[in-house]
Amino acid sequence: MIKKDHSWLGLWESNRSELVYHPSIRHVAFQVSLENLKGAAGWLKDKGYNPREAFGFGPHEPFVMAHDGMAHAKIHFNDPDGNSLELITKIDNPNNVTSRMYLSEWEKENSIR
């Protein structure tokens, strides 16, 4: 997480990369609102990007990863250079669910509208 006065983000343009891919090197997540995340798959496609499978979830809608009383909804895609990008939002976990599921399933299970 980038925090004011504590984090840096450096971007360099290059014609080649000599590093083996690892998410910590070529992955960036952007925090968005829950409402924006719900429309993200269509928005990305309209912009020419395809959401991709991640953590065993298909790209057709955001999914939720819940743990330790917290939960995050997210969707993944790649930029034109193949970097892994993610749109993510923290969501309430009132029932302390620890399983992973699609956002639509999460909303039904937690009665979120």
Image (cartoon, helix red, strand yellow):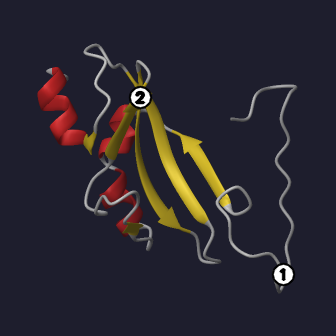
Q: Position of residue 40 (x, y in %)?
A: 37, 52
* Disc 2 + disc 1, Cβ < 8 Å: no
Describe the element under mark 2 as helix, strand or loop: strand
Q: Position of residue 48 (x, y in %)?
A: 43, 74
Amino acid type shown at disc 2: His
Circle 2 Cα neighbour tier, 10 Å, few/some/many (<14 / 14–19 / ≥20): some
Vertical placement of 113 versus 30: above or below? Answer: above
| Quarter occupied by the C terminus | top left
Instruction: Name the residue at 29% across, 13% down.
Output: 94
- The x and y percentages for residue 41 are 33, 58
Q: Which quadrant of the figure has residue 33? A: top left
How many badges with numbers are in the image? 2
Determine the secondary structure under disc 1.
loop
Q: Is residue 32 above or below residue 97?
A: below
Q: Residue furthest bottom?
A: 15
Q: Nearer the viewer, residue 52 or 54?
A: 54
Nearest to the eye among marks 2 and 1: give it: 2
- Dot 1 alpha-carbon crowd within 10 angstroms: few under 14, some 14 to 19, many 20 or more: few
Residue depicted at 63% across the width and 69% down the height: 83
Residue 113 seen in render: no
Q: Which mark is residue 18?
A: 1
Camera-side residue: 46 or 62?
Answer: 62
Q: Is residue 15 above or below residue 91?
A: below
- Left of 112 or right of it: where is 55? right
Nearest to the observer: residue 16 or residue 56: 56
Residue drawn at (81%, 80%) of the image: 17
Report x, y in % for residue 50.
40, 71
Any mark on residue 67, and which?
2
Amino acid found under the numbered disc labelled 1: Glu
Residue 47, quarter of picture: bottom left
